[in-house]
Image (cartoon, helix red, strand yellow):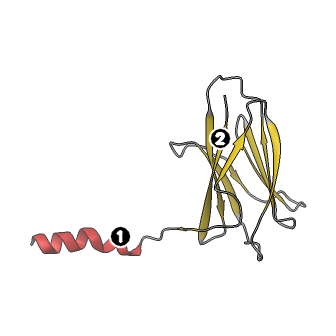
Amino acid sequence: MKLLRYILLIFPLLFLSCEEEEDFGFPSKIEISANGESVDIKGANDLPPFIQQIELLNYNGDGNNSGAFIDGKDCMEATTDWLTVKYYSAEYKLVVIAEPNKTNKKRKLYLYLYDGKSRQEITVVQSK
């Protein structure tokens, strides 16, 4: 009976899909000065991925900051109270724009790039 219960608990887990971590050609960490700045990052892969969504989340996974393509533009954007990220697919480029940090604390967000089956996580850190 215990074996049957164990199988019934484990069996559904076999059908859960997990997104694989992928290197889309961008760095895994971006460091930004406390003064705020705009950083342009060109992708490094020979064949650019087909990024379908970008997302900015904090360490708790909170943040309703999903970006999708802006109508009529080749740009996808996600924004929080202090950080804006734009992805230009034709140029295979990320633009990360941070407001000045007046909190006197280091700030950190996680940028996720999704291509439909994989994702890349990029840590964005702003000094205090």
Of pointers 2 and 1, the one earlier in the residue sequence: 1
- CA gap between label 2 and label 1 equals 34 Å
Relative to 102, is 56 above or below? Answer: below
- Where residue 35 appears, x then y in whole percent? 78, 30
Quarter of the image where one finds residue 62 = top right
Tell me the residue at 77%/33% (across/down): 99
Amino acid at dot 2 = Val
Relative to 16, is 63 above or below? Answer: above
Amino acid at dot 1 = Leu
Tell me the residue at 25%/68% (across/down): 9
For label 1, the SS is: helix
Quarter of the image where one finds residue 91 = bottom right
* Apparent side of residue 61 relative to residue 5 in the rendered image (left or right): right
Mark number, residue 119? none
For the C terminus, the quadrant is top right
- Where residue 19 appears, x then y in whole percent? 53, 68
Relative to 35, is 63 above or below? Answer: below
For the N terminus, the quadrant is bottom left
Quarter of the image where one finds residue 26 = bottom right
Q: Local crowd at mark 2 within 10 Å, few (<14), some, or many (≥20)?
A: some
Between 50 and 28, the one nearer to me in the picture: 28
Q: Residue furthest left?
A: 1
Q: Residue furthest right?
A: 72
Residue at image mark 2: 125
- Where residue 3 appears, x then y in whole percent? 13, 74
Q: Are marks 2 and 1 in contact (CB under 8 Å)?
A: no
For label 2, the SS is: strand
- Where residue 30 appears, x then y in whole percent? 69, 48
Residue at image mark 1: 13
